[in-house]
Amino acid sequence: MATASCPIQVDAGPSQAFGLRKAERRSNQRFELALEFDLFQLRGAKRLAWHSSGITVDWSRNSVLLRSGRNLPPGSSAQLVVRWTAGVQLIVVGRVIRSDERGMVFKIQRRRFRGKPLLIVSLAELINWQPSGQPN
């Protein structure tokens, strides 16, 4: 008795077997944004201990995917200090909700900016500034 070959792979899920894309289950859109950060583990109400540094992968309104040299275990409370722009840091307080080989997913509980943007124009440039079209 001849057996017919089945075009559907055994290990494929139902949506993959019929050529359908998986539906996006996330409620918030994610944005690829690679920024350097330092990660501090919260120990008690006001104690921070530096844990690692790394790079952000993508952001949503409620969470951020991080890659660093060392992951914190799920459930850990932490503070993320992101180098936003020159002189400005984004401080994010939250909790690790997933930690695996792809990185850590950090649930954002609070966020605020700290610092002031650095003035790019030096004082000497301001003193010697002339409107365009006029000689120095």
Image (tube, rainbow, N blue to C red):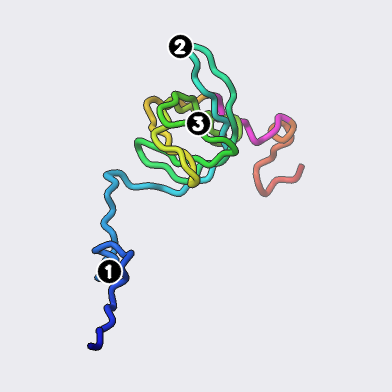
Q: Residue at x 66, y 35 (%)?
A: 121
Residue 112 appears at what percent x and percent y?
44, 25
Q: Indicate the amino acid at tag 2.
A: Ala
The C terminus lies in quadrant: top right
Q: CA distance from mark 1 to mark 2?
A: 50 Å
Image quadrant in which you'd find residue 70:
top right
Residue extending farthest right: 136
Residue at which label 3 appears: 72
Q: Residue at x 29, y 46 (%)?
A: 26
Residue extending farthest front: 1
Residue 43 appears at what percent x and percent y?
50, 16
Q: CA distance from mark 1 to mark 3?
A: 36 Å
Q: Residue at x 45, y 38 (%)?
A: 99
Q: Secondary structure at mark 3?
A: loop
Q: Could you tell which of marks 1 and 3 lies nearer the N-terminus?
A: 1
Q: Indicate the amino acid at tag 3.
A: Leu
Looking at the rendered image, the disc whose residue lies closer to the viewer, 2 or 3, is 3
Image quadrant in which you'd find residue 11:
bottom left
Residue 114 appears at what percent x and percent y?
52, 24
Label disc, if present, on residue 45 of the rendered structure: 2
Q: CA distance from mark 2 to mark 3?
A: 18 Å
Q: Is residue 22 above or below residue 38?
A: below
The N terminus lies in quadrant: bottom left
Question: Which residues lie in the magenta part?
Answer: 115-123
Residue at which label 1 appears: 17
Left or right of 9? Residue 127 is right
Q: Secondary structure at mark 1?
A: helix
**Within 10 angstroms of label 2, few (less than 14), some, or many (20 or more) residues?**
few
**Within 10 angstroms of label 3, few (less than 14), some, or many (20 or more) residues?**
many
Give 124 or 106, whichever is nearer the viewer.
106
